[in-house]
Image (cartoon, rainbow, N blue to C red):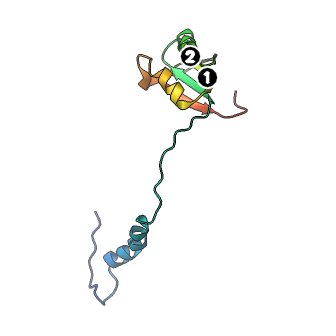
Amino acid sequence: PLSAAGPGAGGAPTATAILSDLLAPFESSRAHRPRAAAVADERRLRWLVEAPVGVPALLELFARSELPAKAAGCGPRGSRVIVEAASWRTLEGALGTLDAPEHVATARLEEGVA
């Protein structure tokens, strides 16, 4: 909690006065700040997927969704597969069919990353 006291009103500046002077420009600029909005990224990107199921099950899942994938080994939470080209929406839809999608980790792979 912030506690401020002092003479104020013409006397020495109080902590409250200083704090209100510091916050005033911020508060008044809030109304004029443009709003940011999330935008769906529909680009087909490479993804690393780690899930608590076997590699064959993951490869089959992606094959059913017509997503090109290849095995990438095992990680701390399960099997890893690289999906070669998928939008996030398509990948998310495929992963949503798993029994425990909340235990799936995904990472977008940039060019030059194996």
Q: Between 63 and 114, which is closer to the camera in this rendering?
A: 63
Q: Quadrant of residue 64?
A: top right
Does 3 sit left or right of 64 as displayed?
left
- Residue at 53% x, 26% y: name it: 90
Residue 104: where, in percent of width, then height? 48, 24
Residue 105: where, in percent of width, then height? 51, 27
Residue 23 is tagged as none
Image quarter in which the C terminus is found: top right
- Residue at 63% x, 18% y: name it: 68
Does 11 sit left or right of 71 as displayed?
left
Q: CA distance from mark 1 to mark 2?
A: 8 Å
- Residue at the bottom extreme of this rendering: 10
Residue 31: where, in percent of width, then height? 40, 65
Q: Between 15 and 92, which is closer to the camera in this rendering?
A: 92
- Residue at 60% x, 19% y: name it: 67
Q: Between 70 and 79, which is closer to the camera in this rendering?
A: 70
Q: Which residue is mark 1?
A: 83
Q: Which residue is mark 2?
A: 62
- Residue at the right extreme of this rendering: 112
Q: Secondary structure at mark 2?
A: helix
Q: Earlier in the sequence, mark 1 or mark 2?
A: 2
Does 98 sit left or right of 73 as displayed?
left
Give the amino acid at mark 1.
Val
- How packed mark 1 is, by other alpha carbons closer than 10 Å (few <14, some 14-19, many 20 or more), is many
Q: Is residue 35 above or below residue 2?
A: above
Give the amino acid at mark 2.
Phe
Q: Contact, CB < 8 Å: mark 1 with mark 2?
A: yes
- How packed mark 2 is, by other alpha carbons closer than 10 Å (few <14, some 14-19, many 20 or more), is some
Q: Secondary structure at mark 1?
A: strand
Q: Quadrant of residue 14?
A: bottom left
Does 109 sit left or right of 25 as displayed?
right
Residue 75: where, in percent of width, then height? 56, 21
